[in-house]
Image: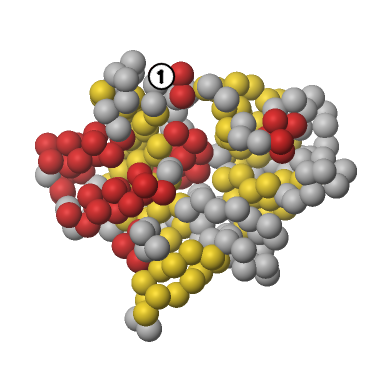
Amino acid sequence: MKSIDPTARDCYLLEIEGVELGPVIPGQFVHLRVLPATDPFLRRPFSVHSYDTGNRLLSLLFQERGKATGILKELKPGTAIDVMGPLGNGFTLNGVARALLVGGGIGIAPLYYLGRRLREAGVETRMLAGGATSLDLPAENYKPHPEVQILWSTEDGSRGYRGTVVAMLKEHLLKNPREETADMIYSCGPTAMLSEVVKTASNHRIPVEVSLEAVFACGVGACLGCVHPVNAREGTRYLRVCKEGPVFNGKEVIFDA
């Protein structure tokens, strides 16, 4: 481990050097063994926040939620961390000219690497990022790329738009013509937020991809412990979030099952 630094309330940026992952698609995740001991026993999944192939530097943005992440935030530089990945399917990058990224809370984690890669490919990219208060958001200059515009929202109005990130998205799409806004929406955040983002994208006839969160045991699709219902031609199917996801076509995901 190279470093770990706080970025927002209960949120930390972890940098691990010497990680050989090969090509990483934004939206993929890695599975960490926090300690070599058996407690905590299971690995923990973390979205790739950034990856520098040349320097083999992996960055992860995480929120302290339980025992494993509580241990992780206390690790000292130089500590060895077992990293498995990249795993899962990432976001679609091809065929996009204007992208709109919508993140809620720690859901911004995979969107930063996505924003960087899109902008490097010449895609016009804008991010909408929201939290309950400014304390739940990184610094305003914390950007994936200098040319990615970030619009902030907070429910208490302490930074940017006053309201939820979904409310800001709806207002943004109403005020701007579709051809000037986005031909793809990418989103990550709480399930209820994702459901509203998909409905809003559908109302404006904009394709949407979402990154789902689930509890992963194996992380490679063997245990079937992270299945989620989606619409398919043959009816409802249950797909593995760790294997077929975590990124899905938002309009196929069943959120009210």
Q: Is residue 101 above or below residue 227?
A: above
Q: Nearer the viewer, residue 148 or 72?
A: 72
In the figure, residue 162 lies in which quadrant? top left
Which quadrant is the C terminus positioned in? bottom left
What crowding class fits label 1: few (fewer than 14 Cα within 10 Å), some (14-19), or many (20 or more)? many
Image coordinates of residue 130 in percent, x first then y, are 36, 31
How is colour applied across the structure in the image? secondary structure
- The residue lying at 39 percent from left, 26 percent from top is 132
Q: Is residue 104 above or below residue 223?
A: above
Residue farthest to the right, as pictured: 37
Judge left or right: residue 63 versus residue 132. Answer: right
Q: Is residue 137 visible?
A: yes
Element at badge 1? helix
Residue at x 36%, y 72% (from the top left corner): 231
Relative horizontal placement of residue 148, taking residue 63 as reference (left or right):
left
* Residue that label 1 marks: 134
Q: Going 57% across and 25% down the picture, which residue do you hit?
A: 10
Q: Which image quadrant: the N terminus?
A: top right
Tell how many labels: 1
Q: Residue furthest top?
A: 158
Report x, y in % for residue 12: 60, 27
Q: Is residue 60 left or right of residue 111?
A: right
Q: Quadrant of the rendered structure where residue 67 is? A: top right
Q: What is the x, y in percent for residue 118?
A: 41, 45
Tell me where residue 161 appears, x and y as whole percent. 26, 24
Identify which amino acid the numbered label 1 is placed on.
Ser
